[in-house]
Image (cartoon, rainbow, N blue to C red):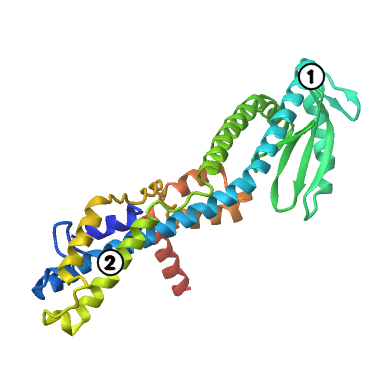
Amino acid sequence: TKARFISQVLSGDNTLRTAEDIGGQELSFAEVKAIASGNPAVLTLAEADAELQRLSLLKKNHLDEQFIARRQVRDLPETITHLSDRIEQLKTDMQAMSHHEGEPITINSKLIAQEDLLNTLGHQLEKLLFMVGHSASKHFLGTYRGLEFGLILAWEFPPEVYLQGTTTRRTELSRSHQGPRAVHNALERLARGYVTESERLRQELDITLIQLRDYQQRLGKTFPLEDYLSNLTTLRDQLKGRLASSNVMQGERDNSELTAAELAEQIKTLRAAQHVDSSPERPRLGQIAAEEPITTRIRHRGLTITGSTTSETDTTEDLSLDADGWSAENSQLQREYSKS
């Protein structure tokens, strides 16, 4: 039973103002009240009110879509220009790397042989250890396949290796591997990634162009159900006035005025001739991954603090402790502390 109204919320169908804990074949409170009154026109009035609520929300969604379309038509051309420039820059850098294919790495304007590369790069990295500051700083090291490379260092972040030509690409080193071989491997990964990055940007550019055309087609469109909304509102207001009039309840009316039954029949005819589609459902989000257990996080925090004195074997054994083992060990330590 609870899943019925929960599904109303999760489906993204915002054409209703309430989520009721009832099934689709059950009657709402307004319909039950209308039936209990003994006047079928009251039921028609309740249905018209519900329909007008849906139409009002659909019109609001239409206005929101128009606002988004105006904003996207304004912003997407700048995104397209940025993507196009980035693709051209990557293409230029790939041509430069292809032209310098097989050339040795240059450090301090000197060509470094392959067998001396790691030692020379290691000496340069040792010098950079004394240049780390609180703000990020860029340090040039040499050239790799015709492009400049170096490190971006900051006190609170792991170092990043950059490869720069007409554009800059960079990758972060792990905290445990920051030596010369890790830097060299990072350069190779960056060089191989130019083709993948270029293909990804081309796909993103194609999608952005399609989105721009789609938003341009939507821009300026009027609400398609505006006439239906206006006519139904007029008939609803007239029906509400007839039902509230004491003369109509007594069967007295002017010849120029319609009775409540006639107005209710016009509302039914109008609704039957008009089909209203619900707003599209919002796409479901992926499931959220489970959080790391609190005992594991506490253990990792302790290992980080005392990592310099903890061996690899001790770390593996500590990480294998489960929650019960941790609680038992903690309780034992507290008892020993109390005795002392």
| In the image, farthest residue toward the bottom | 246
The type of residue carrying mark 1 is: Glu
Residue at disc 2, secondary structure: helix
Label located before the other in sequence (2 or 1): 1
Residue at disc 1, secondary structure: helix
Front residue of 54 and 93: 54
The type of residue carrying mark 2 is: Leu
The residue positioned 18% from the left and 56% from the top of the image is 24
The residue positioned 76% from the left and 43% from the top of the image is 152
Asked if residue 29 can be seen in this view, the reply is no
156 with respect to 324 (left or right): right
193 with respect to 218 (left or right): right
Give the class, few, some or many, for how many residues have Cα within 10 Å of label 2's Cα (few <14, many ≥20): some
The residue positioned 61% from the left and 33% from the top of the image is 205
> How far from the left and from the top, in percent, is residue 328?
37, 60
Give the class, few, some or many, for how many residues have Cα within 10 Å of label 1's Cα (few <14, many ≥20): few
> How far from the left and from the top, in percent, is residue 98?
75, 17
| In the image, farthest residue toward the right | 109
249 with respect to 313 (left or right): left
Front residue of 304 and 32: 32
Residue 226, by quadrant, is bottom left
**Residue 79 against residue 111 in the figure, above or below:** below
**Residue 323 against residue 181 in the figure, above or below:** below
Which residue is tagged 2? 235
Which residue is tagged 1? 115
